[in-house]
Image (spheres, helix red, strand yellow):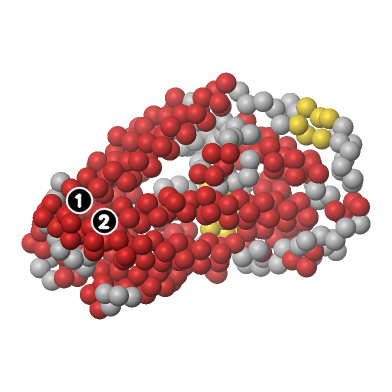
């Protein structure tokens, strides 16, 4: 990887600065087609529930579910399974293009069609069971408390989301990829030492075999309490230098130390509550107007589920810029934490450049992209911050000095 360096006059910065290279023509095309795909997927996510409502398909699914399970709870469970199957099949062409064909077109995937389809088949029962396990909750609350169901359902999302974060790393993720201990024991020791400095005792670092599926690189944090872990793709470990890997893991540790998972759980609960309140206020008027077409007269009828998805989806779309702004703030602060604990500006900056090159990213996306798709700060801004942020070099206080051991 060749990097351009330039003189930097920022107080305390190094004498050379990593400069972000211009994106390749392929990266620009990948970015443009990704934006188009986002528009199509977003539109389809709203069109599909509307289609199920106005064709009467949802009410027919409910009737079939009643035959399968005459009791109310069994009807809801059967409807959830049928709904998952129907929507997955209707979405399959778009899912195939975005998840398989497009990735191969740009040389980002190693996955065979058989493996991709196998993963898709495995996701069906997981999605169906998952929906069946939670769908009864809002509909039970609608029956018991028609005026405040939205508030109780929003509150119920907190333990549900937390439980999912506990279950997913242990039971779901291993169904799709092989997780194991880092092969590079020396690097593992350095990462665990860094985790010890960050006060993350009992945390686990896993290497996941993603090279069988993709050429892109990534790392993430997952789990809560006893299941918390940092997951590094083997592609990242292969393509980054040890110091760069340490910065990446320090960034992921920052999410733990700064309690970003808690913010995500509570933020999700607020978003769900607001969305359900909008459903509560708008749904009955729409049901009264379209009752003959939709073939149900009450929101407590499980056939109304596509209406919940449609109205909730519209609210979520309207709130997307706010949600992504919070996400970008979290990612920026995790970068800050990682810089303060490692004090390796160059490793940070070169890591971001490498991520750009390996993932076909565009370093300076439009404002539109940032508002509606940008869950992370732009790579350009992250490199600039990595180049310049050196408070320790000019005697300034570190923002997160009390969050890690700085004596080593």
Q: Residue furthest top?
A: 25
Image quadrant in which you'd find residue 256? bottom right
Q: Is residue 41 left or right of residue 241?
A: left
* Residue 56 pos. (x, y %): 14, 50
x 36%, y 62%: residue: 278
Q: Residue furthest bottom?
A: 144
At label 2, counting other C-alpha atoms closer than 10 Å, the crowd grade (few under 14, some 14-19, many 20 or more) is many
385 over 397 or under it: above or below? above
At label 1, counting other C-alpha atoms closer than 10 Å, the crowd grade (few under 14, some 14-19, many 20 or more) is many
Q: Is residue 138 left or right of residue 303?
A: right
Q: Is residue 355 left or right of residue 224?
A: right
Q: Image quadrant for the N terminus?
A: top right
Query: Circle 2 — which element?
Result: helix
x 71%, y 31%: residue: 20
Give the mark, 2 or 1, whose residue is nearer the N terminus.
Answer: 1
Q: Nearer the viewer, residue 268 or 193?
A: 268
Query: Circle 1 — which element?
Result: helix
Q: Mark number for residue 307?
A: 2
Q: Nearer the viewer, residue 65 or 378?
A: 378
Is any part of residue 243 visible from this angle? no
Whether residues under marks 2 and 1 lie with C-beta atoms below 8 angstroms apart, the answer is yes
x 20%, y 51%: residue: 53
* Residue 51 pos. (x, y %): 22, 45
364 over 150 or under it: above or below? above
138 over 192 or under it: above or below? below
Q: Mark number for residue 67?
A: none
Q: Nearer the viewer, residue 172 or 357?
A: 357
* Residue 88 pos. (x, y %): 27, 45
Q: Which residue is mark 1?
A: 53
x 47%, y 58%: residue: 169
Q: Nearer the viewer, residue 141 or 358?
A: 141
**Whole-Å distance between the Cαs marked 2 and 1?**
7 Å
């Amino acid at each position: 990887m060749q990097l351009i360096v330039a003189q930097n006059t920022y107080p305390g910065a190094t004498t050379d600065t990593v400069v972000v290279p211009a994106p390749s023509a392929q990266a620009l095309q990948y970015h443009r087609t990704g934006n188009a795909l986002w528009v199509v997927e977003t539109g389809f996510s709203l069109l599909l529930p509307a289609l199920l409502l106005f064709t009467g398909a949802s009410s027919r699914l409910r009737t079939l579910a009643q035959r399968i399970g005459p009791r109310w709870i069994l009807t809801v469970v059967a409807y959830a399974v049928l709904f998952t199957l129907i929507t997955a099949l209707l979405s399959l062409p778009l899912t195939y293009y975005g998840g398989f064909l497009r990735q191969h077109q740009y040389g980002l995937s190693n996955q065979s069609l058989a493996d991709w389809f196998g993963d898709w088949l495995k996701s069906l029962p997981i999605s169906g069971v998952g929906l069946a396990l939670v769908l009864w909750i809002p509909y039970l609350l609608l029956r018991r408390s028609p005026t405040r169901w939205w508030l109780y359902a929003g509150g119920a999302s907190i333990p549900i989301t937390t439980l999912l974060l506990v279950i997913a790393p242990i039971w779901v993720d291993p169904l799709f990829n092989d997780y194991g201990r880092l092969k590079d024991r020396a690097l593992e020791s350095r990462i665990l030492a860094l985790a010890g400095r960050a006060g993350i005792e009992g945390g686990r670092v896993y290497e996941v075999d993603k090279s069988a599926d993709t050429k892109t690189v990534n790392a993430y944090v997952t789990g809560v309490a006893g299941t918390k872990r940092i997951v590094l793709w083997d592609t990242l470990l292969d393509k980054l230098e040890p110091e760069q890997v340490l910065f990446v893991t320090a960034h992921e540790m920052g999410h733990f130390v700064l309690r970003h998972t808690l913010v995500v759980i509570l933020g999700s609960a607020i978003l769900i509550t607001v969305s359900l309140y909008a459903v509560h206020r708008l749904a009955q008027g729409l049901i009264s107007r379209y009752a003959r077409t939709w073939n149900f007269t009450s929101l407590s009828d499980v056939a109304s589920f596509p209406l919940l998805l449609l109205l909730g989806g519209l609210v979520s779309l309207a709130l997307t810029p706010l949600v992504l702004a919070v996400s970008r703030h979290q990612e920026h602060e995790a970068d800050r934490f990682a810089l303060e604990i490692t004090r390796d500006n160059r490793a940070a900056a070169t890591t971001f450049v490498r991520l750009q090159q390996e993932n076909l990213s565009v370093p300076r996306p439009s404002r539109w992209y940032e508002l509606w798709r940008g869950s992370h700060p732009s790579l350009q801004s992250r490199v600039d911050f990595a180049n310049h942020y050196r408070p320790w070099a000019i005697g300034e206080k570190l923002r997160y000095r009390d969050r890690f051991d700085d004596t080593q």
